[in-house]
């Protein structure tokens, strides 16, 4: 496992780090990043570089899984909805009265559970503040958001 940073603790939950550390066939290489992917009709070779030492290693590898990180890509929202201090979208009970005021919230009711500061706009999955960053929870949140969309459409 290649980790661009100095460790896993900044971007991964403790239970997952523990599982990785306890798995004998996983080696964690920190301060290391992919430098080359090579092959003719499919991936055959991978190279990576340790950014501390400058050393590059080449291995015969046919599969790569890339996890690009946990930073939300919400800059494009341009102040359209309230974000927390880390750039995740604030929804439902996490939205403050001040944020609703600043967003010119036009409704008497507060936002529904997954609703943003823009009425009828919902956020689900990893981009939502407070999400547990698991596929199953993102799928569940998506299902819940759909039921709220139906509720909003009835209003």
Image (cartoon, helix red, strand yellow):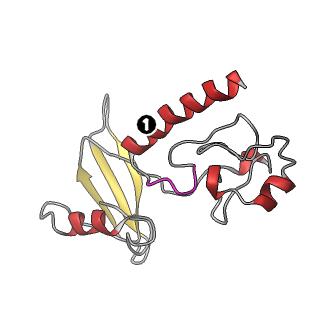
User: Which quadrant holds residue 10?
Assistant: bottom left
In this figure, which residue is indicated by the disc labeled 1? 139
Q: Residue furthest left?
A: 24
In the depicted structure, whether residue 101 falls above or below residue 155: below
Please state the extent of the stretch shown in magenta in the rendering: 128-132
Q: Main secondary structure of the magenta part?
A: loop
Is 151 on the left or on the right of 75, as rendered?
A: left
Estimate the x, y position of residue 93 in percent, counting from the top left.
63, 55
Residue 88 visible within the image? no
- The residue at the point 73 percent across, 26 percent down is 155
92, 130: nearer the viewer? 92
118, 83: nearer the viewer? 118
- The residue at the point 68 percent across, 22 percent down is 154
In the depicted structure, whether residue 53 falls above or below residue 74: below
Mark 1, other Cα within 10 Å: few <14 / some 14–19 / many ≥20:
few
57, 3: nearer the viewer? 3
Is 20 on the left or on the right of 73, as rendered?
A: left
29, 154: nearer the viewer? 154
Estimate the x, y position of residue 89 in percent, counting from the top left.
64, 51
- The residue at the point 27 percent across, 42 percent down is 63
Estimate the x, y position of residue 44 in percent, counting from the top left.
26, 40
* Quadrant in the picture for the N terminus: bottom left
- The residue at the point 30 percent across, 38 percent down is 43
**How many numbered circles does the render carry?**
1
Estimate the x, y position of residue 124 in percent, counting from the top left.
55, 42
Residue 71 visible within the image? yes
Is 92 on the left or on the right of 108, as rendered?
A: left
User: Which quadrant holds residue 99?
Assistant: bottom right
């Amino acid at each position: 496992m290649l980790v661009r940073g100095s460790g896993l603790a900044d971007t991964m939950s403790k239970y997952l780090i523990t599982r990785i550390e306890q798995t004998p066939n996983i080696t964690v290489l920190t301060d290391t990043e992919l430098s080359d992917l090579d092959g003719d009709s499919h991936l055959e070779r991978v190279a990576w570089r340790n950014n501390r030492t400058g050393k590059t290693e080449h291995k015969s590898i046919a599969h790569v899984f890339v996890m690009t990180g946990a930073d939300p890509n919400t800059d494009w929202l341009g102040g359209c909805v309230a974000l927390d201090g880390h750039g995740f979208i604030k929804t439902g009970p996490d939205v403050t009265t001040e944020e609703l005021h600043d967003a010119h919230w036009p409704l008497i009711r507060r936002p529904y559970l997954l609703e943003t500061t823009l009425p009828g706009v919902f956020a689900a999955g990893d981009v939502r503040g407070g999400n547990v960053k698991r596929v199953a929870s993102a799928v569940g949140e998506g299902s819940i958001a759909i039921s709220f969309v139906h509720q909003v459409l009835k209003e």
